[in-house]
């Protein structure tokens, strides 16, 4: 594993041939200055990018309208769906499904026993949600937003599941406090540990043949 960027990174987004991320660039008068960088797989180098490129990547082509629903677009989680709809999860647990014309289709709170959802991802017609403070994953029907399935709870394999990444039929959970990655098969619901780290893991993603982990100290290539 190799560190490729050192510092406080807020989120990493996949691009067609690289990654794009927001990070703590500076502090001015007790206010955080956000920076945006892109790593190109073609050149193997980082470059600064404008905020609108970050917003376009995160919220889709209608990002100017979508971010009006976000109190904090950096900490808001988003899923750009193939039909142009966008699902957003705000830091306070409020979620919205927004149509391609930026009209809200559904909105409500994603909470479980008083815990706010920490991340969301889509698999087939379902919305999978991580609840970091409750050590639970919940599956919702994306059409009705009704809860369908729960993994975890009293005897949970999770210890602060911060985020989730879905590839094929597998969800990979960033198990923050346990400092590891947990694999969950979304068909059989089997659970296993696949990777351990020396510090808290905040986010995991794959882009092409490359695997990345966001830890407290920065971005690492696995």
Image: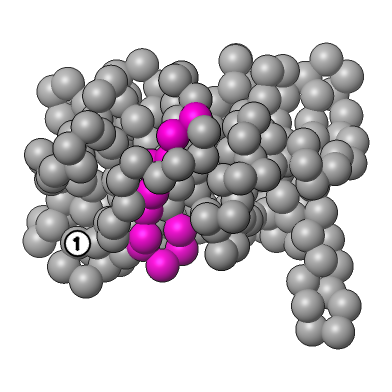
Q: Quadrant of the N terminus?
A: top right
Coordinates of residue 50 in the picture (x, y in percent): 85, 43
Coordinates of residue 17 in the picture (x, y in percent): 72, 18
| Quarter residue 18 falls in | top right
Query: In the figure, 120 relative to 218: above or below?
Result: above
Coordinates of residue 43 in the picture (x, y in percent): 88, 19
Residue 180 shows in the view: no
Which residue lies at the image location 52% right of the left edge and 33% below the top edge?
A: 101
> Considering the numbered disc 1 on the image, is that residue within a helix, a strand or a loop?
strand
Which residue lies at the image location 77% right of the left edge and 36% below the top edge?
A: 53
Near mark 1 (Cα within 10 A), the count class, few <14, some 14-19 or many ≥20, is some
Number of labelled discs?
1
Query: In the figure, 93 relative to 206: above or below?
Result: below
**Front residue of this view, candidates 126 and 64:** 64
* Residue 211 left/right relative to 45: left
Write down the region rendered in magenta: 90-100
Which residue lies at the image location 22% right of the left edge and 32% below the top edge?
A: 143
Q: Which residue is mark 1?
A: 112
Which residue lies at the image location 59% right of the left edge and 38% below the top edge?
A: 59
Q: Quadrant of the C terminus?
A: top right
Residue 215 shows in the view: yes
* Residue 185 left/right relative to 32: left
Query: In the figure, 67 relative to 184: above or below?
Result: below
């Amino acid at each position: 594993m190799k560190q490729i960027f050192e510092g406080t990174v807020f989120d990493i987004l996949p691009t067609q041939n690289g990654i794009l991320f927001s990070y703590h660039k500076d502090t001015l008068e007790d206010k955080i200055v956000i920076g945006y960088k892109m790593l190109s797989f073609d050149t193997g180098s980082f470059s600064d990018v404008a905020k609108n490129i970050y917003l376009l990547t995160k919220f889709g082509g209608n990002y100017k309208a979508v971010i009006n629903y976000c109190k904090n677009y950096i900490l808001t989680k988003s899923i750009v769906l193939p039909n142009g709809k966008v699902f957003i999860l705000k830091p306070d647990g409020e979620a919205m499904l927004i149509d391609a014309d930026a009209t809200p289709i559904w909105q409500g709170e994603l909470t479980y026993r008083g815990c706010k959802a920490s991340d969301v991802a889509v698999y087939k017609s379902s919305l999978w949600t991580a609840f970091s403070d409750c050590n639970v994953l919940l599956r919702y029907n994306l059409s009705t937003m009704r809860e369908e399935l729960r993994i975890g709870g009293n005897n949970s394999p999770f210890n602060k599941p911060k985020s989730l990444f879905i590839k094929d039929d597998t969800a990979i959970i960033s198990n923050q406090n346990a400092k590891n990655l947990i694999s969950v098969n979304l068909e059989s619901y089997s659970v296993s540990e696949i990777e351990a780290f020396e510090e808290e893991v905040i986010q995991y993603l794959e882009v092409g043949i490359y695997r990345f982990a966001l830890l407290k100290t920065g971005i690492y290539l696995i």
